[in-house]
Image (spheres, rainbow, N blue to C red):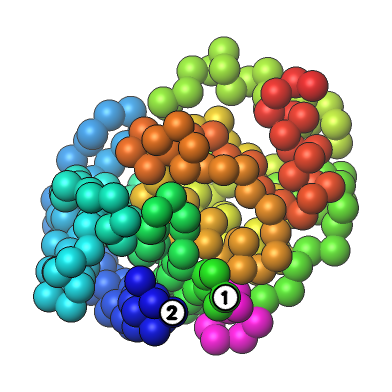
Amino acid sequence: MTDIDIRSRYDFAVALVREAGEHAKDFLRDRAALEVKSKGPQDLASAADLSTELLIRSRLGERFPEDGFLGEETGATDFAPGQGIWVVDPIDGTQPFVSGLPSWCVSIGFVQDGEILFGAVYAPALGELFAGGVGIPATLNGAPVERHPGQSIREGITGFGYSPRISADQFLPMFSRFIERGGMYFRDGSGALMLCNVAAGRLLGYVEAHINSWDCVAALAIIRAAGLETNDFLANDGLRKGNWIVVGSPKVRAELEAVRTGS
């Protein structure tokens, strides 16, 4: 895939993520009538999630039929070696979405040959679109982002993720170490948005024991485009199985990795 091929996909993704976000937002006009189903503890899916993913999948299939697709709601196509793969969460933060909170977003990332090439994340209720990738600067609403100046978890706020896929016995020791080392945490119900807020310099870093690929791949591309560090999320089949995640500046990431492992 040439640079022109990648750039055409990136430009399409930036336009599509905005279209999809406005489509999802339309469902909030009658939030009380929105059909919502539970996929498990604290894991919801609404009619808006499915409708938005079908819109994205259709648009991508029409424009780039040769590419693969992995979405939270409709699953994955077959992947061939060397094939580009779109990784999509139609609404990251469904719980905030159905609760009338603004902390939800549409996330579209692109992966090829084990590399996250670019991502676009749009939060319609906040009017914020984050984007960036390999060779593409990280931006917020088209303007370059700025890194957080803090070099320790004691010098700002860290995004801290949690899901019921991790037991309390696995989560609480890590969280306790974070607090004992002077960290202050933030969680808004959307991993993708918290990660984008790291890229934008609002948060110091982010840590989570397990996160799914559709929740983070697009934002990881933006974080790396902003010059920040991440672990190798795609290792050990992270694309399909999810993985742990630690991001931030080199010093902050090292500190958060010590928090995660207890080292």
Magenta range: 137-144
Q: Secondary structure at mark 1?
A: loop
Q: How many discs appear?
A: 2
Q: Tell me whether the residue at label 1 lies in contact with that at label 2, contact meaning CB atoms closer than 8 angstroms.
A: yes
The residue singled out by tag 2 in the image is 3
Q: Is residue 139 magenta?
A: yes
Would residue 221 be seen by someone viewing this image from the given angle? Answer: yes
Please state, as top left, top right, bottom left or bottom right, where the C terminus lies in the image.
top right
Residue type, label 1: Gly
Q: Secondary structure at mark 2?
A: helix
Left or right: residue 157 versus residue 74 is right
Pick the front one: 27 or 145? 145
Would residue 71 be seen by someone viewing this image from the given angle? Answer: no
Residue shown at 46% from the left, 64% from the top: 117
Numbered circle sitting on residue 135: 1
Mark sitting earlier along the chain (1/2):
2
